[in-house]
Amino acid sequence: MTDLVRRTTHTARPAPRALRRWLPVLLLIAVVVLVAAACGVSTVSPGGSGLPATPEPTPLVGAQPGADPISLLSWLFTPVFQGLFILLAALYKLTGDIAIAIVLMTLIIRALLIPLFRRQTVSQRRMQLLQPEIREIGRRYKGDRAKISQQTMELYKERGVNPAAGCLPLILQFILLIPMYSVIQNGLTNYDPHAMLSAFGVQVVPLDCVNVVNGVFDKARPCIDTTVEWLGGFDVSKPEILFPLPVIGGLSVLAVISGLLQLVQSRMVMPPVSDKSDTQANVQRQTMLIFPLISIAYGGFLPAGLFIYWIVTTIFSIVQQYLIVGWGQFFPFFGRTPGFALGHTPRFPVAMPTEIVNPRGARTTTEAQRGTPTDRAASAAATVRPRERGRQGRRGRRR
């Protein structure tokens, strides 16, 4: 019985490592489920049969805080939703085309966030440049994870690299993605959104609804015209499905384009394959390839306008990355590297992070602790006491 328990325990040990490898994918799925739960609306028929009933259309108003986490989350995102919806309605009133309005709104948002996403790209590139030294630390302190983590963080601090700089833009993307989904799914499909176009009792955008007939709202039609003629006449507030598929609902052309562009963006900043035994780099590469494929599956149930937003966002990121890191690790692609990518120098290249020297010119504590091989050898030689000839006693050498 004891041997059986030991064998079972030994077999179950690799499970946490596999869980850590797929943890980013599980977190992404959890975020998507949370978004769907936060933005989904369902009602129960008064008869108590438990079957979903078609809700009576109501004007668009802000969410109210409740005791459950979903209501609280919706209430917290209401100011962001209202700001995005006012901007989108103003651009729609200016252009008369909802797809062009989504594109312009995306460009405005990304233009305002250029410094933040630039810091993310620069931080990723600096961390890649420091990979040889990080691998050397791993080789030197092999088996001591705590020491490796400590020395790696000291190296980042010494070179002025902030690993957390790449996390904030990703969090901000999700913060914007949730209300953006709600704007397209709920704001563009509502028959009377005027309450959300007012701030402090002032009508910010005087929108003329297309569903008003003789001064009366047609509740079966949305206020904003969500059809786009130059994109085939599809509705941006609904999923754009080329043909139905099981499980995922259908294949969307916009979702495929979005996934391919995300693949290009991921390959540009992907860590180079310099050491196949580097498990962390291999997991990071696999994760960057899996995320674009997952986004293709979203096309069957997410509105097409959200993919227009995501496509423009990805193109903007590709251009920004191209100016900073060039083509990065995108080539070779299928074993081929075109001529224009050979010897390409980015417009704003990232230099190798150098050591930070304090104003007095002294070495930092972390640098002094780690030192160079020559310094460590000299220090070791200086601490060895030379052996004197003569007979030694218990209380010291004989005088």
Image: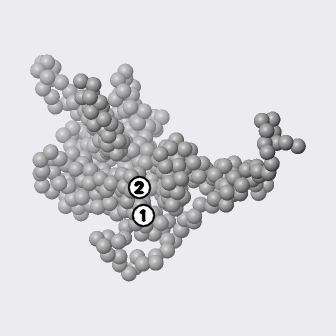
Indicate whether 308 appears above or below 188.
below
- Measuring 46% from the left and 78% from the top, which residue is drawn there? 343
Horizontal and vertical percent position of residue 315: 37, 62
Quick one: 238 or 11, which is closer to the camera? Answer: 11
Indicate whether 63 appears above or below 104.
above
Disc 1: which residue: 274
- Measuring 57% from the left and 64% from the top, which residue is drawn there? 352
Disc 2: which residue: 278
Q: Amino acid at mark 1?
A: Ser
Furthest residue toward bottom: 339
Quadrant of the frame with the C terminus: top right
Quadrant of the frame with the N terminus: top left
Q: Please tell me whether mark 2 sits on a helix, a strand or a loop.
A: loop
Horizontal and vertical percent position of residue 105: 40, 54
Quick one: 145 or 77, which is closer to the camera? Answer: 145
Indicate whether 208 appears above or below 119.
above
Question: Count of labels shown?
Answer: 2
Q: In the shown orientation, is residue 241 left or right of residue 325?
A: left
Is residue 196 at all visible to an observer of this figure? yes
Q: How is the image coloured?
A: one colour
- Measuring 59% from the left and 52% from the top, which residue is drawn there? 155
- Measuring 33% from the left and 54% from the top, which residue is drawn there? 286
Q: Amino acid at mark 2?
A: Asp
Q: Are marks 1 and 2 in contact (CB under 8 Å)?
A: yes
Circle 2 crowding by C-alpha within 10 Å: few under 14, some 14–19, many from 20: few
